[in-house]
Image (tube, rainbow, N blue to C red):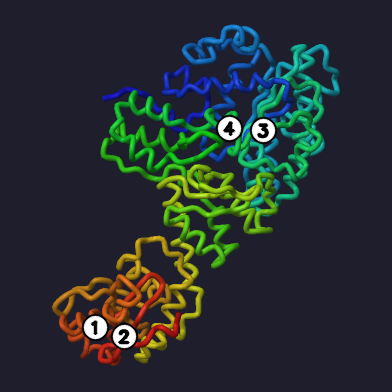
Amino acid sequence: MNEMKIPIGRSGFEDIRRNGYYYIDKSGLIRELLRTDGRQVTLITRPRRFGKTLGMSMLSEFFDIRRENGSLFAGLSIADDKDLCDTWMNKYPTLFLSFKSVDGLNFQKAYDKLTGVISDRYKEHLYLIECDKLDSFTKETYCQVASQKAAQGVIENSLLNLTRMMQTYYGKPVILLIDEYDVPLTKASDNGYYREMLDVMKGIMQVVKDNSALKFAVITGCLRIAKESIFTGTNNFVPDTISDTRLNEYFGFTQKEVDLLLKDAGLTNYTTVIKEWYNGYHFGDFDIYCPWDVMNHVERLMLNPNAKPVGYWKNSSDNSIIRLFIDFAGEAITKKFETLLSGSYVIQKIEEDLTYNELLSSEDNLWSMLYLTGYLTPVRQTELNYSLPEGCFGLKIPNREIKEIFETTVSKWFQESTQKWNRKALFEAVWTGNAETVTKEMTRLLRKTISYYDYREDFYHAFFAGIFAGAGYVVESNREHGEGRSDIIVQDYSGDRMAIFEVKYARSQEGLEKACNEAITQIDSRKYDEEFREDYSVMMCYGISFYKKRCLVQLKGSFAINFSSFY
């Protein structure tokens, strides 16, 4: 059995390297960042689960003056650059903190977690209060922050003051690393205290504005949030997004890296399925795999070679952005979703400087959010064969996992939506034998659906059964009776009426009538209704044929309805 250790849920670079967990070498990120160390602030935005925290942990272990970490980087590409390592490795005071845990249903709970994160960093550098160069007032304030007793104004200045104290202590400027800086704002937007949290975060992020104590800063997140003035006035501020190319090979796995991982794990037979499920992200010039997915599936395959691919990424979040999108746009985005789920792409204007409180101000903002958070990826220009307007992208679903998220979310939305639609006319028509109205009402509902299957009979079967089940009717599918199995049986609430439906799929619009007649013939020939005749006061038998978003309904014993007037 392969003894390779896969680091699931481990984002600490020292932990992974010191304990022998498998590590894909991303140390080239250090070299690339130092090529432009004159930039005061680099903001790196990537979707969640693409290795941001591990990358920041690696940077911290490399630069932190309190460490001697040559052994952690032995064998990695950065170690080959001796001059760089001699100049930079463990040579600078380094402040590393992550806001990814700052969450809460109200502002106070989230604020407490935020001050807790800052308090932990103050405690980590508690040696600073022994510095003779710091006055007693500064030391007293330091203890207030460390004990989470400081006023909000002090908290807002806490990182700025901490970097200044570190510079005073070491006599060197500080390297600042802030991971997931926008999580507090994301959670605040979700829970209704956005403005309060924004005010606090603006104060805290003063640490990167004209701070002479900084050597440079690296910040990660999902969005840039430039419009909120968080970074306004910051000198040499440079964002690096998924649209750029410079750093994209260092967040996520490239094909070469995945090939090596599968070779080392003895799993090269699974290359195709892993690519189909977890590849497909186009970041700048790179084609990228989601590392969280790949590592999780490799571990499962090592334990069970028959393990099927599943959505690991989707299980790490509630995917509320897709539901927010659907609730906001409703039927307006039906056709676009159908296009995406069919494997094609849509053309959309993308705004990368989003703010969380602007999401619902336009449909374009929601498409931008789906792009920036990894649910959609840009189509390569070579696939388009034509130029797009400025600011527009061709967007598509990157892989099987994300497609499954869309399908699940859209299906749930449709099921809930159909329960809200007024179906009184449909149900009355069913029990009175009005096939013309049933045809009309079913067509109306079909027009509202988001179809993304290959229009098989099982799609229509589930669609039709769901309409009645959602209204509280007793619905049975494929029940054996008479001389065969009918598709759907519906009993009303009181139990004295029953309707039998035989569903057929036509291969063309012109074939609807023939398919409908075949359904009626099947009900007759297999005597689906005979065993129920004595038990119900009302018994209706219907043949239904579907073609895409068209349907035709016929009552047993009647003639097919002319459906052309309904479309």
Q: Which is more N-terminal, label 2 or label 3?
A: 3
Q: Secondary structure at mark 4?
A: loop
How far is the residue under mark 2 from the one under mark 4? Answer: 59 Å
The residue closer to the viewer here, 142 or 217, is 217
Q: Residues within 10 Å of mark 2 (few under 14, many from 20)?
A: many
Please tell me which residue is depicted at 68% across the width and 58% down the height of the picture: 361
Q: Which residue is mark 2?
A: 554
Residue 29 coordinates in the image, percent (x, y): 57, 23
How far is the residue under mark 3 from the one under mark 1? Answer: 65 Å
Which mark is in front, 3 or 2?
2
Q: In the rendered structure, are the residues bearing label 1 and label 2 in contact, judged by CB atoms less than 8 Å apart? A: yes
The image quarter containing residue 22 is top left
Which mark is in front, 1 or 4?
4
Q: Which residue is mark 3?
A: 43
Q: Which is more N-terminal, label 2 or label 1?
A: 1
Which mark is in front, 2 or 4?
4
The residue closer to the viewer here, 15 or 453, is 453
Q: Which is more N-terminal, label 4 or label 1?
A: 4
How far is the residue under mark 4 from the one under mark 3? Answer: 14 Å
Task: Name which residue type carries label 4.
Answer: Thr
Q: Secondary structure at mark 2?
A: strand
Residue 537 vertical position relative to residue 75 in the rendered view, above or below:
below
Please tell me which residue is depicted at 44% across the width and 62% down the height of the picture: 411
Q: Residues within 10 Å of mark 3 (few under 14, many from 20)?
A: many
Q: Secondary structure at mark 1?
A: helix
How far is the residue under mark 1 from the one under mark 2? Answer: 8 Å
Q: Which residue is mark 4?
A: 245
Q: Secondary structure at mark 3?
A: strand
Q: Is residue 259 left or right of residue 135?
A: left
Q: Which mark is residue 520?
A: 1
The residue closer to the viewer here, 381 or 220, is 381
Residue 16 vertical position relative to residue 206 in the rendered view, above or below:
above
